[in-house]
Image: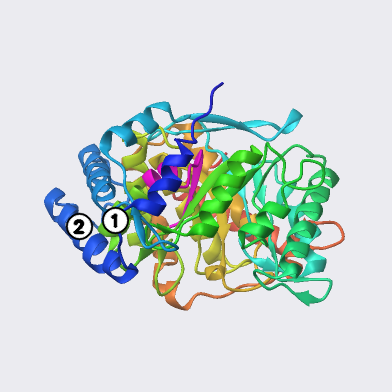
Amino acid sequence: MRLVPPWRINEVLKRAETGPICLERDFDLKVLYSKLQSVIKERDIKFDPEVIIPSDNSLADDVWKAALELYLEVGTLCLSTHRRILFDESEIKEAMSLSSREIVVGSGKDATRMCHREIEDSKRPFCLFSPDITCDEELFIPMSMAYLQEPLADGVCAPILDTIEGIRIKAGSPIEIKGSIAHAMMFREAARRVGRPGIFLQSVGTAETDAAQIAASNSTWGERLTDGRFVASIAELKVDYSLLNKMVHFHQYGCFVGALHGPMYGGYCGGAEGTAVVGTAYHIQALMVNQAYYSNYFPIHFKYSFNTSRELLWLISVTYQALARNTPFISLSNGFTAAGSFTPMVLYEAAAHGLVSTVSGANLWEIAVARNKYKNRATPMEARMACEIGHGIAKKGIKRSEANDIVKRILPKYENKLTEAPIGKTFSECYDIKTITPREDYVELYNKVKKELMDIGVPFL
């Protein structure tokens, strides 16, 4: 099976040096914001708070057309050179026509497929479990094992270290390289200990800089060729030399390259409509500049750092419907909840995110909790809730209109608490660290909420 990208790496790097000169502030206000408002108005894209999961295919197509028009004119700004990387439509169409709709990740008995999904797809979503937070060094292996042993986890991203052997990790310092290597080693050990040595492992989140990412590339003890690495983007639609360095290294090393992008609702994107258009455009950048096989997409509230509100769920649905209908892209929808672990609210939020994302055509990356702000505060239980529902949506053939009715029954359970959500409990308070199992009272809460959700029509695996 031939995998594409990369799409002419040298051409991308050359345009980062020779494209039109543009200062960052001019890019934000005069180029991006101005064009974004124009395409939204031209396509008459409007958020309807009563239709969280639209069934209107023309809306999805309008969002795609607006995103393509936006990206063709705006491009990607390289902050290191103050140059815009631009493509014409024929180049984007060529890259899309060759882009892989399916990749096999992981190795041996643990290898699995990550695929493009359609709207209302009966194909189950690829489920990547991730705590998305920092943790204490002594908790790294137990927390990683807790996620790795989840049966629905097709891949796992580890927590992030902020100290190693008692020394605080500082980006760009030698201790970052030391910590990143330790991260990769311990994550590999955790996978072996749960009996899944070949499972798809995503990223080395501890490694912020290009040098640290390169240091963790080692098929024996670190990141293998069958694992995934991220080339992130800088909001909105920007990259720099460090990110491009990672892209070049990952492709020349030979591992799977993913794109990481989170447009900010309430920033230069504006409201739900603009964030959906920019989020869709990010996926074009993911293919052309980040040179990615798949994306991790997390639109997020600029002020409150969640994406489970009515507006954010709508734009997640619209973005994925646009991608499903018009592209071959593989993308994972990354949830961010307001509430923390061991609360009914976090399980409601996870349920809503998993439901909306799956029926709209997304794969799942679950889930950052408590606004992704608090160390040690995440467990696999929240991801399990979203992914059980994702599997249920696909298995039972739930349609968009039905899913819209269901999510409108879930939202009243939490949406008035989003700005003052409980932060919940720590991993150690939710799990027995020795046995690496959830504590009985959290299991009881999970089952209680699960029954409540089933009673209002939420499908489970």
Query: Could you say where residue 437 lies in the image, as x and y percent from the top left?
Result: 78, 56
Question: Which element is circle 1 on?
Answer: loop
The answer to whether mark 1 and mark 2 are in CB contact below 8 A is no
Q: Is residue 342 visible?
A: yes
| Residue highlighted by disc 1 | 20
Tell me the element at label 2.
Answer: helix
Q: Amino acid at mark 1?
A: Pro
Relative image position of residue 43 (x, y in whole percent): 15, 48
Which circle marks residue 35 in the picture?
2
Instruction: Classify residue 461 as left or right of residue 198.
Output: left
Q: Which residue is more in the foreground, 127 or 352? A: 127
Residue at the extreme bottom of the image, as rendered = 420
Which stretch did the figure color magenta?
A: 283-298
User: Which residue type does callout 2 highlight?
Assistant: Lys
Name which of mark 1 and mark 2 comes first in the sequence: 1
Q: Residue at x 41, y 39 (%)?
A: 361
| 3D distance between C-alphas at marks 1 and 2 | 17 Å
* Circle 2 Cα neighbour tier, 10 Å, few/some/many (<14 / 14–19 / ≥20): some
Q: Residue at (74%, 55%) from the top-left corner?
A: 144
Percent of width and height locating residue 290: 47, 47
* Foreground pick, 304 / 1: 1
Residue 224 occupies quadrant: top right
Left or right position of 165 against 55: right
The magenta stretch spans residue 286:
yes
Q: Nearer the viewer, residue 418 or 327?
A: 327
Where residue 381 sits in the image (x, y, percent)?
Answer: 65, 56
